[in-house]
């Protein structure tokens, strides 16, 4: 079956512009995560959606970052007024979101963002 | 102090060697531990998942958790060139869905 897909795969933008990154999770997965991975670094948690619950936004680094998930499926991560420090790979993951054994995350290939 | 510490490597070994990858953590509330493998320009994929102290084996891979020392390990036996990748540890608390990742260890297995 189809895995997690993300678009665009690469994005080059100018400092100060807004960007939107899209994630299509695996069908039926109720949980969705966004992570940021800077070059040579581990994954930095950004935001977590679970069903219809309020998202956990505790990892968003500033108010320039926002995310939404429409209809419990597709998610969009928006970065406003991009800065060079926002350059990174943005990874999306989804999971069944249930109890133990159901929270295995399946990752998309990521969007590589370069802010000039 | 970071929640999870992991030696970035790189670690270079000959084919057939036993590889040991490690992470330490500071939060004693972490209950679930995972190892992910990430190939270049790909998303991470889950290798091993455990929630108890002790060893868990899956083929050539063994995950080890020592909660008293806040230390986890991944052992790879008979390493292959195809094992060359970055290995990330991840962990979370019992009732929380926020995962904390290590920075990853880059492994190179030479033929």
Image (spheres, coloured by chain):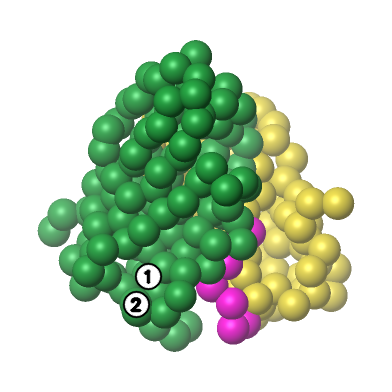
Chain colours: A green, B yellow
Above or below: residue B37 compared with residue A50 = above
Mark with earlier residue (1, 2): 1
Relative image position of residue A103 (x, y in whole percent)? 43, 73
Comparing A85 with B28, the one in front is A85
What kind of element bears circle 2? loop
Relative image position of residue A94 (x, y in whole percent)? 35, 62
Relative image position of residue A88 (x, y in whole percent)? 51, 31
Magenta span: predominant SS is loop
Displayed quadrant of residue A39: top right
Q: Are marks 1 and 2 in contact (CB under 8 Å)?
A: yes
Q: Residue at x 66, y 28 (%)?
A: B10
Quadrant location, the N terminus of chain A = bottom left
Mark 1 vs mark 2, CA separation in Å: 6 Å
Could you tell me if residue B87 is visible in this image?
Answer: no
Q: Residues within 10 Å of mark 2 (few under 14, many from 20)?
A: some
Chain of the residue where label 2 is placed in the rendered structure: A
Residue behind mark 2: A51
Q: Residue at x 82, y 63 (%)?
A: B26
Could you tell me if residue A1 is visible in this image?
Answer: yes
Displayed quadrant of residue B63: bottom right
Above or below: residue B59 compared with residue A18 = below
Residue behind mark 1: A31
Chain of the residue where label 1 is placed in the rendered structure: A
What kind of element bears circle 1? strand
Which span of residues is magenta-colored? Answer: B94-100
């Amino acid at each position: 079956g189809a895995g997690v897909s993300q678009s665009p795969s690469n994005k080059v933008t100018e400092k100060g512009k807004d960007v939107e990154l899209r994630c299509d999770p695996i069908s039926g997965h109720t949980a969705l995560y966004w992570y940021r991975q800077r070059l040579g670094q581990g994954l930095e948690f950004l935001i977590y959606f679970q069903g219809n619950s309020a998202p956990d936004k505790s990892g968003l680094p500033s108010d320039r970052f926002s995310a939404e998930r429409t209809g419990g499926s597709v998610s969009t991560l928006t970065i406003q007024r991009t800065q060079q420090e926002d350059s990174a790979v943005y990874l999306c993951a989804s999971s069944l979101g249930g109890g133990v054994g159901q929270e295995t995350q399946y990752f998309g290939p990521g969007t590589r963002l370069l802010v000039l | 102090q970071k929640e999870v510490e992991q030696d970035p490597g790189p670690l270079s070994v000959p084919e057939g060697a036993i590889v040991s990858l490690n992470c330490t953590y500071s939060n004693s509330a972490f209950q679930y531990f995972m190892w992910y493998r990430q190939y270049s320009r790909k998303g991470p994929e889950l290798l091993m998942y455990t929630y108890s102290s002790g060893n868990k084996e899956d083929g050539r891979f063994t995950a080890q958790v020592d909660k008293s020392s806040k230390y986890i390990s991944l052992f790879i036996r008979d390493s292959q060139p195809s094992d060359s990748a970055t290995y990330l540890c991840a962990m979370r608390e019992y009732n929380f869905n926020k995962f904390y990742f290590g920075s990853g260890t880059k492994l190179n297995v030479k033929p």
